[in-house]
Image (cartoon, helix red, strand yellow):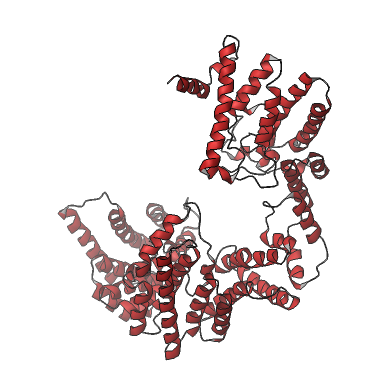
Amino acid sequence: MKRFLISNLLVLSALIGAKACGGEEPARQYELFSIVPYLETGNLFTGRTDAFWMEYTKGEMEYEGYDGEAVLKIAEKKGDKEMVAYLNHLNDYLEICYQLKDPWTYPTKEELKERKNTLRGLLVAAEKYAGTRLRPQYFLLAMRANMMLKNHAANKDFWQNKASLLGESVYKDMMKNIYAGALLNLGNKLEAWNIFTEQGDMESLRWSVRGYAGLAGMQTVYGLHPNAEVLKFLLQDYIYDLCRFCMYSPESTGSEVAVLTKEMQDFAAFSQMVLNEGKTENPSMWLMACAMVHYCTKQYSEAFAEIDRALKAGGTERMKESARCIRLLVSTKSFCLDKKYEKYVAGELNWLDGKAMSENGSGYYNMARSLIDEHGIVPMLKKAGRVEMAMAFEHNVEDYSSTQVIRYLAFVNGKPKSPLEKYILPKADKDADHFNDVIGMKCIAEGKLAEALVFLEKIPLDHYKGKSISWYMSHRDYTKARWFGKQKTKPYDSESEGVEITVNRRIAFCKEMIQLAAQNLLSSDDEVRKKTAYEMAVRYYQASHGGDCWYLCHDYWSACENRLKWECDFSQMAVDKLNDSKTSIDFDLRQKSLYALAFIPYNDSGDVGWYDSNVRKSFEKQQRAALMELNAFYKENHSRVAQYITRCDVFGMFRKSLQK
């Protein structure tokens, strides 16, 4: 369900969205403001119920989760009559649920009557059950049937007088959720919202508070109950929206800025009123909210003062820990990077790491750590000129030059000299084979082939064992011209992963190119020079973004990849060599060179400039010129040219376009 938008910012949000690039996402630092957990409703109860059925069936089911037919067969096999009876009732109920979910099901009056009779039968079965083992399940069955029959008052009474007295279990939690729905339908919205919030049922909550989103909605709810649980949810969603607008509207017009400014002023005034009245049990969350808005609008001193107050004010444990994360982020914009501050940051990161470890890789604290690193610590370190330490926090050297990576390695293998260095160096990536490979690839991409060999020759072939890149090394040949066909594509099966290689093609490429470059430069024979120029062009283009052998410079390929400013434009270097080889007196070499020049897309350099219409027109002009030159050659030699020219669809369409 879409997050509710603040009512008086609807127009502004549309305008901001129209300006943004569709593939980009705004920075998400505002998600550090987390006073209620956002849980997926589908995972709210199913994980625990699935665990029950897996335990009951002792792993006999083929798949995890509840399979009504499979569980029923297992219960029958066990001779568990009590469970068999219950499962028959449960499966009847679930069948009705499946029918209701199917948008193409149009029941007749008779079928609707049959459904009601089935549900009434479930109520009778639940009432007749006299055992204790499955009492929670039968109670839940009764409340589910009442919910379907819209007996909301009956469900309210059932929960208050029976179900609420049961011991804690997933079934009791599910019944409480149904009870909240009954309260909602009976007009007791506030208590229903509080239960949904308490359970983390965001889907139900979002739907039920859809008329109370935004500042006006919060003011209404606060007026009814200053400490309503739902206020936490409303405030969190509101801050996310407001901060997203603040951070994602750098080109807003004067009128848009005025709307946004007025909204923030109104929110600040309301928050101050809440704090002044002293009715709230959680003043921390209102101070945190103000701090987050000030951070997102780059008012860092105000943000730090407010988050400092939030840590000392009353609030839940979750609020305190969220405030602590926000304070660390805001501090990166507010303090000088001296040893005292470094000690504070290192201490907070150690605390955050401990919290993140308990989440097994995902959750609020892992997300918080990632956001603080990306938007706080790394920019702060770069601004202070401590690039190598910033790289250690990024855990990614992809966007750096070979020289910078060499400096990084020296840094992480050195002795720590400050509190932050003591924190990060033991955690930094420093595997020798990995970084020799990375530096070697980067040197190739930068055209420093002799230097690449120094690093690549240190790597054992076993380094590539089990890695996906080994398949490309094994199957893609950089000596085959790309313009004569695309090489084999990696199959989508597990057997293609990590094939064994006998030659490091990155090393072979460097050695061959160094030899060809020497021949090309030193040869006194023009024809030899032009032949080596063509061979170099083949290899240059194969190593480019458009080639099949991109693995020479990178460990992966992406259609959105842009060439970094210090990397060679191998595509253009291939063109330069082909412009030399096309002047050969060797007919075959001339036609191969002209065909290659017409084939190479002039936007293949990976430059962002391709999205600029003027740059694009320049590329198209160059491509057309190459096709025109090939066409002139074809006209003069049409009886001699190779079939790869005469049968080329693109060239054929180009020639037809000239006849119009």
Q: Residue 571 in the image: state x and y as whole percent.
A: 65, 35
The picture places residue 568, in percent across and down from the top left corner, at: 70, 41
Horizontal side, residue 273 vs residue 510: left or right: left
From the viewer's perspective, is residue 243 above or below residue 590? below
Question: Toward which corner of the image does residue 485 lie, by quadrant?
Answer: top right
In the rendered picture of this protein, how many numbered marks are placed on residues? 0
Q: Residue furthest top?
A: 639
Task: Tell me the residue at 45%/80% (across/down).
Answer: 268
Please say whether residue 477 is visible from this viewpoint.
no
Indicate the quadrant where residue 79 lies. bottom left
- x and y, in percent, of residue 258 in the image: 41, 70
Where residue 310 sits, quadrant-wise, is bottom right
Q: Quadrant of the N terminus?
A: bottom left
Q: Nearer the viewer, residue 442 or 117?
A: 442
| Above or below: residue 117 compared with residue 449 | below
Whether 133 is drawn above or below 402: the answer is below
Tell me if I can see residue 396 in this picture.
yes
Task: Answer above or below: position of 327 versus 515.
Answer: below
Q: Quadrant of the C terminus?
A: top left
**Residue at 50% across / 81% down in the picture?**
287
Residue nearest the viewer, comparing 447 with 165: 447
Residue 383 location (% of width, % of height): 68, 65
Front residue of 625 and 240? 625
